Structures are given as structure tokens and as C-alpha cells.
Image: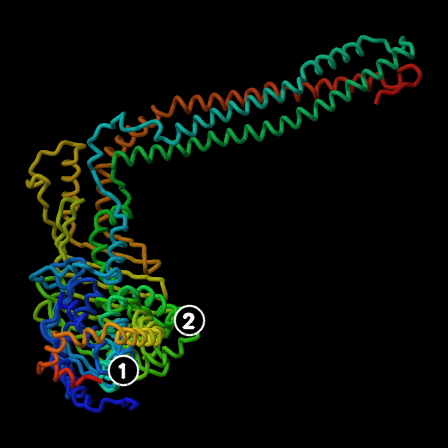
Amino acid sequence: MKRPKLFRWRAIVPLGVMIALMGLVWWLLLDRIVELGIEETGAYLVGARVDLERADVRLRDGTVALRGLQVTNPNAPMQNLFEAEEIVADVRWRPLLEQKVAVDTVAVRGMRFGTPRQESGELENPSPQSGMVAREVVAWAEAVRVPPFSLEGLGRVVDVAALDPDSLRTVGEARALAARAGAVRATWDQALAALDPQPHIDSARALVQRLEDTDVRGLDIIRATRLAGEVRQTLSDLGTLGEGVEVLSRTAQANLGDVQGGLGALVVARQADYAYARGLLELPSLDAPDLSPAIFGDAAVAWVEPVLYWLRLAEQYLPPGIDPRRYRGPDRPRRAGTTVEFPDAVSGPRFVLEFAELGLELAGEGMAAGAYLARVTGLTSDPALYGKPLEFVARRSDAAVGPSDVSVRALLNHVAAPVVDSLDVGLAGIELPSLDLDVLGARLVMGRGTTDLQLARTGDVLSARWSWHAPRATWERLAGPDGGDRGARAAQIGTREWAEELLWRTVSGLRDVRIEVGLSGAVQEPVLTVRSNVGQVVAGNLQRELGQEVERAERRARAQVDALVNDELGRARRSVNGLEAQYREEIEGALVALAAVREELEQEVERLGGRLPGGLRIP
Amino acid sequence: MFTLLKLFQSFVRALHSDGTPRQVAAGVALGAALGLTPLMSLHNLLIVAAIFLLRVSVPGAILGWLVMLPVGFLLDPLFDAVGSALLIDTGGLQPVWTAIYNTPVLSLSKVNNTVVLGSVVGWVALAFPIYFLARAGVRAYRATLGPRIERSRVVRAVRATKLYNFYRLFQP
């Protein structure tokens, strides 16, 4: 039987043609493949649509030109995070054979931030991982508690029914204390009944009386012996009884201290109830450190959100070390799985951008609108392999509009753990943003001013300070809820309108505005602090003019709490006082009586000492 | 419907090809790789080249691909688990993966993906059982049902067409 040949030589040509065709298709579709790859990868990273108008790959020149890149702001789908007219990159091709991208230089032209989009950039089905950083930052921002600042409680009469006695700590604790005092009293009664000291005391007194009345020299030996025995027995009984009462006294003192401590706790509970009742009234806090977050908290959160976003993004995609890294696999009909990258100390990074020059343009008439020139060096996915930190420097390139002085410098050292990031931004002569401050019923038009941001991060610990200074700020009155001018209505003292009028009078004359936002603590959930001279001035004026109203409302709240808790509090106090009286009368009294009668008996024994017939001795 | 028709055609072609049962079974085993593993992978280019260059049954390979395609989808969770065990959980293999990941061309094989690696390993493990099962199946078919179908008028009519001559170019 003829053995079939192993190779089908005739198929080499068709196979070659097929491979050539595949290569041709790949070459023809390369631009589109790159375009789709950038759009998909970008959407995965950002969590919102990334649109690229066109990609132009020139294999011979080793360049990739991207035109019309738009990256949607994940928090505002109708706005671009940034867009770039043209990005031209010089790419090294050999690393591509290792699925690595090494870019020598990048030139970015026409980069603008915050531009509007024509259609929503929201993803229909975002993967759980895509935009995770953005979601975490938004979650942090939503969790930041901006203290409420409401004046509505001022004009409101305290609603008696609004306070449920059972919701007050004092009532519950007073009831528990009274019950505890009752239980202690029962225990004492039981112990005293078991000891029953009074008959013993009476009996001892009777014996003392008898000794006083008896002429012991006239007693015969039998009666003298009986008397001596009786005295000994009584002294012994008194001793035993005294010890028992002493033990009871010590226990009772501890019990008494405990319930008296409960009375002290009731004072604390009442203070807590006052605070609770005051909280129901929604009275404003008039302390300056509290007012600044209430006034500028929302704006501060919006300011620091992008800073945290980029910081976290850098943390996620520029990790230190060369440990394997896991990512979700590519989207395909089959399961995506997990793609694991294995950086190697001797190989190059998966992505590296040696040098990029960016022409930035901040759109509109915003605070930093204008043209900038920025340089990035050492942007890499594997800083440990690259061995140098990422450096970003930006300066003003066109002074026609926008800031007069710009200084931006960022250094991200992720070469080894812990990561060390620093950011220093200084902008002078810029148009600062206008803020609608609903709590004040006014819009703050900050006008031209300066802003400085200093940020330092070491490992997970973040420390940042962002200050804003508007030396010639102006204020505009916001329309009221009914659309009318708030000031147009006649304001009655103590009403909300009156308080708002007062706020307007306070801030409308304020020209020099300083705001300082601080971030500190863990980078995942930093603590936000806000300080401003506006908060201080508002608090000062409110304290002067509103203080009386606030105090009156607080007094009403306190009176309401008192009315609800006084009965229970009185009952608890009476129980404790009764217990104290019982201790004094019955336990301490018994101890005193026992000691007195014992002393009297011992004095009698002393007096009779040596006079009993037969040389009998009483101990 | 079209897929079912293609499946049927591939099945008939493989069973009736002039190739030996071994060649048909080898084609099925190689084609199974295309079905069991994600198609757009570097190793599948090599598999296709092997199907073309080696004297294995091309219809058998297509049959193996089409039959194993749904099986691949069904086994994806298992492949993912196997891949995870090898790529992530077995620390001893890390130098191997690091070397592959950082070697030019080899790194394009995408075996650093759990599903790709798990399915390739799954195919390697199943290739020989598939081969032996397919060979036994073809032998049994040709001994019983095959001759009757060969003599049928429909088959004779198809063989008379020019299209069949072109198809013969790819016969073993």
C-alpha cells in the first residue's frame, strides 16, 4: 500500500496568496484598526466615549498621526475632557513585535479642554473596570458631607409634636436609672432583712444598762460567770454583725456611686438631646470654620475632583515595581478572560513616551482660557523599567488672553514604591470662576485673581493646598425660588427673608475674597477642608445680628427637651436620692449604732475590769 | 440555516473524501483548534498553514472547526479557569510567561490571556482523543453507510460539476 505524502506542496502558492491577501487587507485597514484600538482603549481607561476622526499610520516613516481626538468627560457626557486637533507620534516599530509601544516624540496641536460635544459621550454598556477611577472619585465627592447652612429654622415655632420623648436619650436613660435604683434598693432591703441589726443593737443596749445597774461585787460566782459569758457572746455577736454590715456598706457605697454616676450621665444625655433638638430646627452654625465649608464646599469638591482623578489615574496606570499586572481581556464574542502582563527587568516598558510637546488651548472665556505650551518627558506604563520619573512642565505661549503668569510643574516618581508625586501650579492674572452660592443667595464674581496649587503625595498619603485670591470680587444677587428678586420682598425680622437680606448686606460689600481648599489623608478618601474670609465675615455678622434669634430658637428647643425629660429626670433623681437617704439611715445608721453600742459595752467591761468575783475576766 | 448546511456539507465531504481516515481525523483534530480557541490568534494562523501544507483533509478541518466552535464557547469558563491557574496561580511558571511575553513575535501569541492559554492547553489535551475518535468514526462510516451514499444519484451529479474539480485541488 502506497504511503501518502506528508506535505501538500501544491498548496504553498494558494497559502502564500492567502497570507499576502491578509497582509494587504491588514495594511489597507491599518488606519481603521489603530483608530478603533485607540477609541476602545481610551473608552476603557476613561469610562466614556473616545472619538477619533482619523488615524494615519505611515509604516515607512514610522509615524502615526491622529486627527480630531475627542475624549468625553465621564462626569459630563455632553462635554469633552479634552480634544486635540492633531497628534503626531514617532513610533519605534521593533517594540511593536513585543506588543510594546515606544514613542520617541509626540507633537500635539490644538489641544483644548472642556469643549462642548455635539452628541452624548456616555457609554451604553461600560465594563465594570472602565472608568473605575472616575466612578471612585465621584463616589468620594458624593460622600463628602458639606455642612448644611439653612436659616429656615429661625422663623419656625418649635413643633412640640415633632419631638418624640422616646427619641430622647435622657428619657430612656432616666427610666433605666430609676429602675436600677429600685433594683439596688430591693437588694439592700433583702440584705438588711437578713442581717436584721436592730434587735442585736437593742439587746446590747439592754445588756449595757444591766451592767450599769448591777453591783458586780454582790454577784455570786455562778451569776458572775453567766454575766461574763453573756457579755462575751454579745461582743462576739456585735463583731460578726458589724462585719456583715460593713460588707453591706461597702457594696452599697459602690451601688450608690454607680447610680450617682448615672445621674451625671443624664446631664450629658440632656446636652445630647439639646443638640438633637437643635438639629431638628436646622439652625445655622455660626462658627467660621463651619461656615466656609457650608458656603464653598460644593465648589471645592468640584475643583479637587479632577485633581484626584488624574492622580488616581496615574496611580493605576503608572504603577511602581515589575510585578505581573492583570487587566480585563479584549472585547470579543468569546469570553474576555484576564490578560496578564509580565514586565521584565531587561526588557523595555509596555508603553513609553520619551518626549512630547503639547500645544494646549483652554477654550472659552474661562479662568485659564488661552494658549499654552507643555512638555512631557518619561511617560511610561512601567516606570520601574524606564527608571526615570515623569516630568510635566507647562508655560504660557500666547499672552493675548488668559493668565499673565503661568507656572505648572509636575513630577511623578513611580520608579519604586512608595510613589512620590508633586504638583506645583501657579496662575496669576487669570479670570477666576464665578460661583453661584445658593446658601448666601448670591453669585460671587471673582474676576481676575490668582490661584496656587501645591500637592505632595508620598505613597497613599496626600497633602494638598489650593488657594484662590480675588482682590476685586463683586457679588450679584441670585433670583429667589419664585423667580423674583429676593431683596424685593419686605423682610420681617426673624424670618428667612430677613436672614437672607442680612446675608446679602454682609457679603455684597466684600471685595477681597480668599478661599483655601485643603486635602489631606489617604489618597482614596482624602479629608477636605475649606477656609475663607467670606465664611469668617459672614459668621461674624451673623453672630452679631442673628445671634439673638438663634439663641431664642435654641432656648425653645431646650425648653421642649426639658419639658419632655423633666418628669423622668425627676423620678430618676428621687430614686437616687431615696437610695442615698436609705443608705445614710439604714446602713450607715446601723454601722454607727453598732459601733456606739459596742463602745459602750467595752467601756462597761473596762469599768468592771478585775471586779468580778473569782478573778473572772471579760475579754 | 446556512451554517447548518455548511456543517452538513463539510461533514459529507470529510467522510467521503479520498483521504484516509487518518488524514480526515488529523484534519478534524487541527480544525478543532480553530473552534476551541479564539480565532483571531497567532497560533491559529499556524494551524491554518498546517492544514494547507500538510496532507490532511481540509473538509475534515472545516468540520472540526464548525463542530468545536460551540464547544469552545461552552468550555470558555473552564478554559478561563485553566488559564488563570497557569498564568496567575502557578508562580513557578512565571519565568516562562515572562520570557514569552518579552520575546518578539511570540508575545503576539496572546497566551498571556487566560482564555487563550486555557483553550490552547485544552486543545492540546483534546487533540489526540479527537483524532482517535474521528478516525474510528470515519472507518465505521465508510464500512457501512458511506458506499450507499457514494452510489446515490445526487452525489454523482455533484461530482460531474466544475466546482467539484476546483474543490479537488484541496483534497488530500
Mark 2 or 1, nearer chain start = 1
Instruction: Indicate left or right for A258 with A238 as reference.
Output: left
Residue B51, percent across and down?
Answer: 24, 82
**Residue flagged by tag 2: what amino acid is it?**
Thr
Quadrant of residue B104 in the image?
Answer: bottom left
Of residues A239 and B47, the one drawn nearer to the viewer in this rendering: B47
Disc 1 on helix, strand or loop? Answer: loop
Q: Is residue B69 above or below residue A15?
A: above
- Residue drawn 16% across the image and 69% down it: A39
Locate the C terminus of chain A by quadrant. Answer: top right
Q: Give the residue pinned by disc 2.
A: B90
Subunit under mark 2: B
- Residue drawn 29% across the image and 76% down it: B139
Residue A405, percent across and down?
Answer: 17, 69
Subunit under mark 1: B
Disc 2 on helix, strand or loop? Answer: loop
Of residues B154 and A238, the one drawn nearer to the viewer in this rendering: B154
| Distance between the alpha carbons at the discs numbered 2 and 1 | 42 Å
Locate the N terminus of chain A by quadrant. Answer: bottom left
Residue A219, percent across and down?
Answer: 89, 9
Label 1 crowd (10 A; few <14 / some 14-19 / many >=20): some
Q: Give the residue pinned by disc 1.
A: B20
Residue B41, percent across and down?
Answer: 25, 76
Q: Is residue A142 visible?
A: yes
